[in-house]
Image (cartoon, helix red, strand yellow):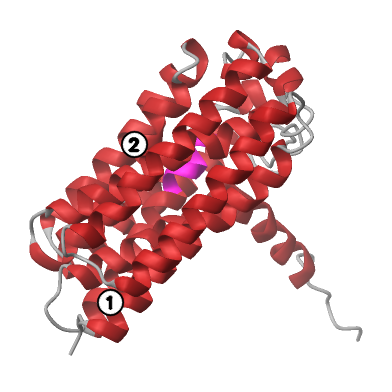
Amino acid sequence: MQPVEISTPVESVNFAWRNFLPLTKPTISLLVVVTLVPALLLASPELPGFTLMLATIVGTFLSAASSAVFNHLLDADLDVVMNRTRGRPVPSGQVSPLAALVFGSVLAVASLVILFIWTTPLAACVAFLANAFYVLGYTLCLKRYTDQNIVIGGAAGAVGPLIGWAAATGNIGWPAWVLFAVIFLWTPPHFWALAIKYQRDYAAANIPMLPVTRGDEVTRLHIFLYTLTLIPAVGALYFFGAAGWLYLVVGMASTLYFCWKAWVLYRAHSNEAAMPLFHYSCLYLFAVFGGLTLDRLLGGLS
Protein backbone atom coordinates (compact mmCIF):
# COMPACT_ATOMS: atom_id res chain seq x y z
CA MET A 1 0.00 0.00 0.00
CA GLN A 2 1.42 3.37 -1.06
CA PRO A 3 1.65 6.18 1.55
CA VAL A 4 -0.74 9.08 1.07
CA GLU A 5 0.99 12.37 0.20
CA ILE A 6 -0.04 15.52 2.03
CA SER A 7 -1.37 18.11 -0.44
CA THR A 8 -0.03 21.21 1.37
CA PRO A 9 3.78 21.05 1.29
CA VAL A 10 5.89 23.05 3.68
CA GLU A 11 7.19 25.09 0.78
CA SER A 12 3.73 26.51 0.01
CA VAL A 13 3.14 27.39 3.66
CA ASN A 14 6.48 29.22 3.84
CA PHE A 15 5.65 31.02 0.61
CA ALA A 16 2.39 32.22 2.11
CA TRP A 17 4.16 33.65 5.12
CA ARG A 18 6.69 35.35 2.89
CA ASN A 19 3.76 37.16 1.26
CA PHE A 20 2.62 38.53 4.61
CA LEU A 21 6.02 39.74 5.81
CA PRO A 22 6.32 42.69 3.36
CA LEU A 23 2.96 43.96 4.60
CA THR A 24 4.60 44.82 7.93
CA LYS A 25 7.27 47.04 6.31
CA PRO A 26 9.82 45.38 8.64
CA THR A 27 12.61 47.92 8.04
CA ILE A 28 10.38 50.87 8.95
CA SER A 29 8.91 49.01 11.92
CA LEU A 30 12.44 48.21 13.11
CA LEU A 31 13.37 51.88 12.79
CA VAL A 32 10.51 52.82 15.13
CA VAL A 33 11.95 50.36 17.65
CA VAL A 34 15.44 51.83 17.26
CA THR A 35 14.10 55.29 18.10
CA LEU A 36 12.36 54.16 21.29
CA VAL A 37 15.39 52.48 22.90
CA PRO A 38 17.36 55.62 23.86
CA ALA A 39 14.20 57.27 25.20
CA LEU A 40 13.55 54.22 27.36
CA LEU A 41 17.12 54.42 28.67
CA LEU A 42 17.05 58.19 29.21
CA ALA A 43 13.83 57.94 31.22
CA SER A 44 15.25 55.26 33.54
CA PRO A 45 17.72 56.00 36.37
CA GLU A 46 19.11 52.50 35.91
CA LEU A 47 19.00 49.83 33.24
CA PRO A 48 15.33 48.89 32.68
CA GLY A 49 14.25 45.37 33.53
CA PHE A 50 14.30 42.70 30.84
CA THR A 51 10.51 42.24 30.83
CA LEU A 52 9.86 45.96 30.42
CA MET A 53 12.39 46.31 27.59
CA LEU A 54 11.16 43.22 25.76
CA ALA A 55 7.50 44.17 26.08
CA THR A 56 8.15 47.74 24.92
CA ILE A 57 10.18 46.61 21.93
CA VAL A 58 7.83 43.82 20.86
CA GLY A 59 4.66 45.82 21.52
CA THR A 60 5.93 48.83 19.58
CA PHE A 61 7.16 46.72 16.68
CA LEU A 62 3.78 45.00 16.41
CA SER A 63 1.98 48.35 16.55
CA ALA A 64 4.13 49.77 13.75
CA ALA A 65 3.73 46.56 11.77
CA SER A 66 -0.06 46.64 12.10
CA SER A 67 -0.26 50.22 10.85
CA ALA A 68 1.91 49.21 7.88
CA VAL A 69 -0.48 46.36 7.06
CA PHE A 70 -3.48 48.71 7.13
CA ASN A 71 -1.54 51.16 4.98
CA HIS A 72 -0.95 48.44 2.37
CA LEU A 73 -4.62 47.50 2.50
CA LEU A 74 -6.02 51.00 2.10
CA ASP A 75 -3.43 52.05 -0.49
CA ALA A 76 -4.07 49.08 -2.78
CA ASP A 77 -6.03 51.21 -5.26
CA LEU A 78 -3.06 53.58 -5.56
CA ASP A 79 -0.36 50.92 -5.48
CA VAL A 80 -1.79 49.07 -8.46
CA VAL A 81 -1.29 52.19 -10.60
CA MET A 82 2.33 52.79 -9.62
CA ASN A 83 5.18 50.77 -11.16
CA ARG A 84 7.12 50.84 -7.88
CA THR A 85 4.31 49.38 -5.78
CA ARG A 86 2.06 47.27 -8.00
CA GLY A 87 3.97 44.13 -7.01
CA ARG A 88 3.06 44.53 -3.33
CA PRO A 89 1.13 41.62 -1.80
CA VAL A 90 -2.39 43.12 -1.84
CA PRO A 91 -2.53 44.79 -5.30
CA SER A 92 -0.74 41.80 -6.86
CA GLY A 93 -3.24 39.37 -5.35
CA GLN A 94 -0.73 37.45 -3.25
CA VAL A 95 -2.68 38.40 -0.09
CA SER A 96 -6.44 39.00 -0.10
CA PRO A 97 -7.86 42.19 1.44
CA LEU A 98 -9.70 40.13 4.06
CA ALA A 99 -6.53 38.27 5.05
CA ALA A 100 -4.65 41.56 5.32
CA LEU A 101 -7.42 43.04 7.46
CA VAL A 102 -7.37 40.08 9.85
CA PHE A 103 -3.57 40.05 9.98
CA GLY A 104 -3.34 43.76 10.74
CA SER A 105 -6.08 43.56 13.37
CA VAL A 106 -4.37 40.67 15.17
CA LEU A 107 -1.08 42.58 15.25
CA ALA A 108 -2.82 45.72 16.56
CA VAL A 109 -4.63 43.90 19.36
CA ALA A 110 -1.50 41.99 20.35
CA SER A 111 0.54 45.20 20.53
CA LEU A 112 -2.02 46.94 22.74
CA VAL A 113 -2.33 43.97 25.10
CA ILE A 114 1.44 43.67 25.46
CA LEU A 115 2.01 47.38 26.05
CA PHE A 116 -0.95 47.77 28.41
CA ILE A 117 -0.16 44.77 30.61
CA TRP A 118 3.64 44.78 30.71
CA THR A 119 4.46 48.48 30.33
CA THR A 120 1.97 51.30 31.06
CA PRO A 121 -1.51 52.29 29.85
CA LEU A 122 -0.07 55.55 28.50
CA ALA A 123 2.38 53.69 26.26
CA ALA A 124 -0.49 51.60 24.88
CA CYS A 125 -2.57 54.74 24.34
CA VAL A 126 0.20 56.55 22.46
CA ALA A 127 0.75 53.51 20.23
CA PHE A 128 -2.96 53.24 19.51
CA LEU A 129 -3.34 56.95 18.67
CA ALA A 130 -0.28 56.87 16.40
CA ASN A 131 -1.66 53.82 14.62
CA ALA A 132 -5.06 55.46 14.15
CA PHE A 133 -3.54 58.71 12.91
CA TYR A 134 -1.29 56.95 10.40
CA VAL A 135 -4.10 54.82 9.02
CA LEU A 136 -7.03 57.25 9.11
CA GLY A 137 -5.29 60.62 9.07
CA TYR A 138 -2.33 60.04 6.75
CA THR A 139 -3.28 57.10 4.54
CA LEU A 140 -6.92 57.99 3.90
CA CYS A 141 -6.75 61.80 4.01
CA LEU A 142 -3.41 63.60 4.00
CA LYS A 143 -1.64 61.43 1.43
CA ARG A 144 -4.41 61.89 -1.10
CA TYR A 145 -5.31 65.57 -0.66
CA THR A 146 -2.32 67.75 0.31
CA ASP A 147 1.33 68.08 -0.62
CA GLN A 148 2.05 68.56 3.08
CA ASN A 149 1.05 64.94 3.61
CA ILE A 150 4.51 63.79 4.63
CA VAL A 151 5.11 66.83 6.85
CA ILE A 152 1.98 66.30 8.95
CA GLY A 153 1.83 62.53 8.62
CA GLY A 154 5.42 62.25 9.85
CA ALA A 155 4.11 62.67 13.38
CA ALA A 156 2.81 59.09 13.32
CA GLY A 157 6.24 57.66 12.63
CA ALA A 158 7.90 59.84 15.26
CA VAL A 159 6.17 58.38 18.34
CA GLY A 160 8.80 55.76 19.17
CA PRO A 161 10.52 57.97 21.79
CA LEU A 162 7.14 58.90 23.30
CA ILE A 163 6.22 55.23 23.69
CA GLY A 164 9.62 54.40 25.17
CA TRP A 165 9.47 57.20 27.74
CA ALA A 166 5.84 56.44 28.63
CA ALA A 167 6.65 52.75 29.06
CA ALA A 168 9.41 53.54 31.55
CA THR A 169 7.71 56.28 33.58
CA GLY A 170 3.99 56.51 32.82
CA ASN A 171 4.46 60.07 31.56
CA ILE A 172 6.30 61.82 28.73
CA GLY A 173 9.31 64.04 29.53
CA TRP A 174 10.74 66.83 27.40
CA PRO A 175 13.70 64.79 26.04
CA ALA A 176 11.21 62.41 24.45
CA TRP A 177 9.56 65.35 22.70
CA VAL A 178 12.95 66.52 21.42
CA LEU A 179 13.58 63.08 19.94
CA PHE A 180 10.07 63.16 18.49
CA ALA A 181 11.00 66.47 16.82
CA VAL A 182 14.19 64.98 15.34
CA ILE A 183 12.23 62.22 13.61
CA PHE A 184 9.45 64.62 12.61
CA LEU A 185 11.94 66.99 10.93
CA TRP A 186 13.88 64.13 9.33
CA THR A 187 10.83 62.64 7.61
CA PRO A 188 10.21 65.26 4.86
CA PRO A 189 13.76 65.34 3.40
CA HIS A 190 13.94 61.55 3.68
CA PHE A 191 10.70 60.95 1.80
CA TRP A 192 10.88 63.85 -0.64
CA ALA A 193 14.23 62.57 -1.90
CA LEU A 194 12.47 59.33 -2.83
CA ALA A 195 9.46 61.20 -4.20
CA ILE A 196 11.70 63.08 -6.64
CA LYS A 197 12.74 59.81 -8.23
CA TYR A 198 9.21 58.40 -8.39
CA GLN A 199 7.26 61.58 -9.09
CA ARG A 200 5.84 60.15 -12.34
CA ASP A 201 4.39 57.27 -10.36
CA TYR A 202 2.83 59.66 -7.87
CA ALA A 203 1.47 61.84 -10.66
CA ALA A 204 -0.07 58.80 -12.37
CA ALA A 205 -1.82 57.88 -9.11
CA ASN A 206 -2.91 61.50 -8.47
CA ILE A 207 -0.98 61.62 -5.20
CA PRO A 208 -0.01 65.27 -4.48
CA MET A 209 3.58 64.78 -3.41
CA LEU A 210 5.63 67.98 -3.33
CA PRO A 211 7.66 67.24 -6.52
CA VAL A 212 4.37 66.72 -8.37
CA THR A 213 2.61 69.87 -7.13
CA ARG A 214 5.52 72.34 -6.88
CA GLY A 215 8.33 70.91 -8.98
CA ASP A 216 11.84 69.63 -8.40
CA GLU A 217 13.52 72.95 -7.61
CA VAL A 218 11.13 73.83 -4.80
CA THR A 219 11.37 70.30 -3.43
CA ARG A 220 15.18 70.36 -3.38
CA LEU A 221 15.08 73.68 -1.51
CA HIS A 222 12.61 72.34 1.04
CA ILE A 223 14.80 69.27 1.56
CA PHE A 224 17.81 71.43 2.34
CA LEU A 225 15.91 73.74 4.69
CA TYR A 226 14.48 70.83 6.64
CA THR A 227 17.91 69.30 7.14
CA LEU A 228 19.08 72.60 8.64
CA THR A 229 16.32 72.45 11.26
CA LEU A 230 17.82 69.19 12.49
CA ILE A 231 20.93 70.98 13.80
CA PRO A 232 19.27 72.68 16.80
CA ALA A 233 16.95 69.72 17.35
CA VAL A 234 19.81 67.24 17.59
CA GLY A 235 21.97 69.57 19.68
CA ALA A 236 19.23 70.36 22.21
CA LEU A 237 19.67 67.16 24.25
CA TYR A 238 23.34 67.93 24.86
CA PHE A 239 23.04 71.64 25.53
CA PHE A 240 20.19 71.13 27.99
CA GLY A 241 22.00 68.38 29.84
CA ALA A 242 20.09 65.25 28.82
CA ALA A 243 22.93 63.64 26.82
CA GLY A 244 26.71 63.62 26.77
CA TRP A 245 29.54 64.44 24.41
CA LEU A 246 29.51 61.05 22.61
CA TYR A 247 25.95 61.68 21.45
CA LEU A 248 26.82 65.25 20.45
CA VAL A 249 29.78 64.18 18.31
CA VAL A 250 27.97 61.34 16.55
CA GLY A 251 24.66 63.17 16.21
CA MET A 252 26.08 66.46 15.02
CA ALA A 253 28.55 64.90 12.58
CA SER A 254 25.75 62.81 11.07
CA THR A 255 23.48 65.86 10.85
CA LEU A 256 26.05 68.14 9.25
CA TYR A 257 26.81 65.48 6.65
CA PHE A 258 23.06 65.18 5.98
CA CYS A 259 22.90 68.96 5.47
CA TRP A 260 25.88 68.86 3.13
CA LYS A 261 24.34 66.15 0.97
CA ALA A 262 21.09 68.14 0.83
CA TRP A 263 23.06 71.24 -0.19
CA VAL A 264 24.75 69.25 -2.98
CA LEU A 265 21.33 68.14 -4.22
CA TYR A 266 20.00 71.70 -4.15
CA ARG A 267 22.98 73.35 -5.81
CA ALA A 268 23.29 70.70 -8.54
CA HIS A 269 20.01 71.85 -10.12
CA SER A 270 19.42 68.20 -11.06
CA ASN A 271 18.05 65.11 -9.38
CA GLU A 272 21.08 62.84 -9.65
CA ALA A 273 21.94 63.29 -5.98
CA ALA A 274 18.41 62.55 -4.75
CA MET A 275 18.78 58.80 -4.28
CA PRO A 276 22.22 59.01 -2.62
CA LEU A 277 20.62 61.47 -0.18
CA PHE A 278 17.71 59.08 0.37
CA HIS A 279 20.03 56.14 1.03
CA TYR A 280 22.03 58.17 3.55
CA SER A 281 18.84 59.36 5.25
CA CYS A 282 17.91 55.71 5.85
CA LEU A 283 21.10 55.34 7.90
CA TYR A 284 20.88 58.74 9.56
CA LEU A 285 18.42 57.90 12.33
CA PHE A 286 20.28 54.70 13.13
CA ALA A 287 23.44 56.80 13.62
CA VAL A 288 21.83 59.51 15.77
CA PHE A 289 19.76 57.21 17.96
CA GLY A 290 22.48 54.59 18.08
CA GLY A 291 24.92 57.25 19.26
CA LEU A 292 22.47 58.36 21.93
CA THR A 293 22.01 54.76 23.10
CA LEU A 294 25.75 54.24 23.42
CA ASP A 295 26.14 57.59 25.16
CA ARG A 296 23.54 56.58 27.74
CA LEU A 297 24.90 53.08 28.26
CA LEU A 298 28.49 54.21 28.65
CA GLY A 299 27.88 57.41 30.54
CA GLY A 300 24.92 57.21 32.86
CA LEU A 301 23.27 53.92 33.59
CA SER A 302 24.11 51.81 36.59
Magenta highlight on residue 69: yes
Q: Which mark is residue 296?
A: 1
- The quarter holding residue 75 reads top right
Determine crowd level at label 2: few under 14, some 14-19, many 20+ residues with C-alpha closer than 10 A: some
- Determine contact: label 2, label 1, CB under 8 Å: no
Spatial CA span between label 2 and label 1: 25 Å
- 173 is higher (above) or lower (below) than 246: above
Depth check, front residue: 91 or 268: 268
Q: Earlier in the sequence, mark 2 or mark 1?
A: 2
Residue that lies at the very extreme toward the bottom in this rendered image: 302
Question: What residue is shown at x 62% (from left), y 27% (from top)?
Answer: 76
Question: What residue is shown at x 24% (from left), y 80% (from top)?
Answer: 51
Q: Which residue is mark 2?
A: 155
Question: What residue is shown at x 63% (from left), y 21% (from top)?
Answer: 77
Could you say whether the residue bearing mark 1 is in a helix, strand or loop? helix
171 relative to 257 in the view: left or right: left
- The image position of residue 87, as x and y in percent, is 76, 38
Question: What residue is shown at x 25% (from left), y 62% (from top)?
Answer: 238
Q: Quadrant of the N terminus?
A: bottom right
- The image position of residue 187, as x and y in percent, is 47, 39
- 212 is higher (above) or lower (below) than 82: above
Does the image show residue 25?
Answer: no
Q: Which region of the structure is painted magenta?
A: 66-72
- The image position of residue 119, as x and y in percent, is 17, 66
179 relative to 204 in the view: left or right: left
- The quarter holding residue 263 reads top right
Q: Amino acid at mark 2?
A: Ala
Residue that lies at the very extreme toward the right in this rendered image: 2
- The image position of residue 117, as x and y in percent, is 16, 66
Magenta highlight on residue 123: no
